[in-house]
Each structure stands twice: as C-alpha cells, then as structure tokens.
Amino acid sequence: MHFSISKEEILETVRMVQTENLDIRTITMGINIQDCRGSDGSSTGRKIYDKIVQCARDLVKTGNDIEKEYGIPIINKRISVTPVSMVVDGLSQDEVAVVGKYLEKAAVEVGINYLGGFSALVHKGFTRGDLAVINVIPEILASTERVCSSVNLGTTAAGINMEAVYLMGKIIKKTAELTADRDGLGCAKLVVFCNAVEDNPFMAGAFHGPGEPESTINIGLSGPGVILNAVKKYPDVDLGELANIIKNTTFKITRTGELVGRVASRRLGVPFGIVDLSLAPTPAVGDSVADILEAMGLEKAGTHGSTAALAMLNDAVKKGGAMASSYVGGLSGAFIPVSEDAGMIDAVADGAMSIDKLEAMTCVCSVGLDMIAVPGDTPDETISAIIADEAAIGMINKKTTAVRIIPAPGKKEGDWVQFGGLLGRAPVMKVNSYSAANFIRRKGRIPAPVHSLNN
C-alpha cells in the first residue's frame, strides 16, 4: 500500500516533537510461539528464545534508525508473544517458570524494554496450562525485569470467571510481597482484563492473540502534550467545536504513527498490524491527560464533570484516528493511569480524585484502573472485588476494562510509592473499608448479559 506524508505535515510533526512531547510510545513486534512446544520446560524455553531472537534481532536497530532519520522519538521497542499458557499446557509449574526465565533472556538478548505475553485467557475456565502460568506469575515478575503478565477473566460473550477473580486477588498480593523491596513493583507488570484485545501494543497487557498472523508490527502512540496545547489555544470555544479541534489534532498524530509503522514493517519484513492511538501520558509535566481535562475548564481532574470531559476526549481521539488510518486497533482512546500521569498524581494528592471516581471515568475511556497504589494490608478479597467491578463495567458495556493495582507492602493511605521512569510515582489511595469477602468467596461465574445473545 502506498503511503505518503506532505512537507507541511512533516514540519508540523517536528514542532510537536520539539515543543509538545510527541513521541511514538512503542513499536511492538508480535510473535507467534505456538510452534515452540518442546518436551519439557527447558526445550520449550529454548525454542521460544531462538524464535524471538531470530524474528526480532533487528527490531531495536530498526527503531533507532527510523528515530534518527525522521526525527520522531521512539521511546520503547517491545515484543508480545502468544499467551504462554497456550504453549505450556501439560508442563509443571516449575517447568513453566523455566519458560518464563527464557523469555527474560530473549528480551535481554534483543535489547527490548518489555516482553508481554506471560499470559492466560481464562474468561470461561482454566486449562492446566492456565493455572500453571497464573500460579508462577509472582515468581516470574519478581525474578525478571522485562517480562509482563496479563490474565483475561471476562468477556461480554462469556461473562466473568469469578474463580479467576478470586485467584487473582491472591496472585496480586503475592506479587507485591515478593517485590516489597521495590514498593511492589512486580504488580506494575501485571494487568487483569475483561474483553482483552489481541493486538494491544502497550504493556503490561500486550500479547499476540490467537487470531494474529505469524508476526506483526503494532504501533502505540502518545501525544497528550499535543492535545493539551491544542485545547489551550481555544479557551472559549464550545464543546462541539473543541471536539473537532481534538479530532483534527489526533488525525495528525495518527498519521505520524502510521508512517513509522509502515516504514518499520517494510524494513523488518513483517506485516503492519495496527496503530493504537491511545493518549499515553508520562510523569513529565505537560504530558498529562488530567491536564487536558483541566484545560477544558475543570478546576481539578476528578471533580464533577470529569467523566463527561473524558468521554468527549476519548470519542474525539477515536474519530480523529479513524480518519487517519484504516488500521486503528489495540485499545485506542485515553489512558488514565495514576502514577504515570503528573496531573493525576496531583489530583489524587489534593484529594480531588478517588478510586470511586476513577472507576466511573473508566466507563468512558481506554482500559480501567491503571497504576493505582493502595495500602499493603488491603485484603485479597478487596483486590478481587475491585477487579470484579471493573470487569462488570467491561462486560456490560462491551468494552475493554482492566486493573493494574499495587497493594504497596508496608505502606498506608497517604504514603507514596516510587517506581521511576515511565512508571512514575503515586500516593497510596484509600479503599473502602467494608468487606466484600463473602461475595468474592462464592466464586462460580457471573453469567454473560442478555445482549451477548445478539447473533
């Protein structure tokens, strides 16, 4: 397919990069590893390692070359693989742990930032491989730096696997405990989904879905700073006009991502997959989704009106991206992580943003409760109940929702966790003190909603 970009677009992109924090957040190569099963953990791990190194040996160099040639920062080069539980069925937990270590070894060898796909899809129940992977997630996330995990435990079509919800509360707490010396950092590499997508390039939730080709290149965009500057230029326009401004600005951002993706695809000899045009914030000042909401007229993100403002932003971003590319995918919209967004951090610290308000806002944005720090003594069942609430929002509304939560060991409400880099820092938030334990312990499955019967 022919793809061109005008001189004027190039100059405008240069300005966005230089003054508005525009970057390509990630080039993520998806790799199918279903053909890598061996007789045991070591042989399976070695086959996976060999395939990753073969497929991705030029990924980082290609990304660096494109960055230099086009002047567009590419922050991360990443890999996603087929959910590991699909490959290791029948292996013991110890053998599955060996496979996890090989994933880390492969990530180090090719020089990527993160590797996603130590994952299980359990929305209707568990295979032996699913349980083996889930049970060794804490060990793998504590003993590796680059491996990321995800578990999908609900869909609109299947309902919610409450056995998995119950189990993941315990897995998250154990992961936090094993990384207590790093404020529970392991939990920042673990996300629990409802309606997970197969082509998501963003960590920690990226995996190479069963419907994907042998290999693919997916692009994850950033751009909150660009949208923020556009909104600030028009302080008096009505919201309909403002939505058009955001839409047109997103169009330009997405064109940049499409260009990078197609160049990378051609050079690597791998099919171009999708552009995920999610506004992915960073802890840097001026690169915040919360700041965009405040530029729209809110005194502080989290106050009344925040959900409406975010809904408009998310919709305009999707419309602008859909105009710019025929291959928009992933999650696409606006992320609202706490620790990774300077404005969100301030909103929580100032008492304007609560977990309850974040939950309401996730009804209209990409994903869900993201990078939320809670007290380390939060009960397992409370973590599970938070997951269940987000999964219910996703199931009923036919959208992807997720939870990436850190029960920070030894920390209480008002303390801070420090992760550094793109993961940032966050104040420990208050959780409801009343128990949901008896509800969570019922387990079973929450049935799919009636609109799942559409056919």
Image: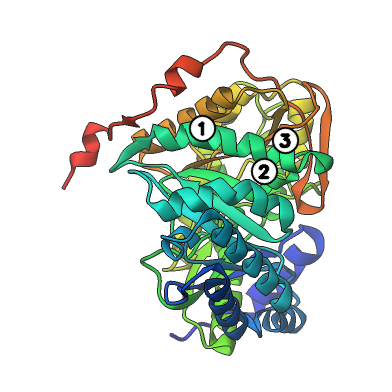
The residue tagged with tag 1: helix, strand or loop?
helix
Q: Nearer the viewer, mark 3 or mark 1?
A: 1
Which tag, 1 or 2, sits closer to the chain's start?
2
Q: Are marks 3 and 2 in contact (CB under 8 Å)?
A: no
Q: Are marks 3 and 1 in contact (CB under 8 Å)?
A: no
Residue visible at 74% across and 29% down in the picture = 347
Which is nearer the eye, 12 or 63?
A: 63
Q: Is residue 366 visible?
A: no
Q: Position of residue 202 (x, y in %)?
A: 59, 57
Which is nearer the eye, 226 or 238?
A: 226
The residue tagged with tag 2: helix, strand or loop?
helix
Task: Residue 344: give its label.
Answer: 3
Q: Is residue 323 depicted above or below 377 in this figure?
A: below
Q: Residue under circle 2?
A: 187
At label 1, which amino acid type do we have? Ile
At label 3, which amino acid type do we have? Met
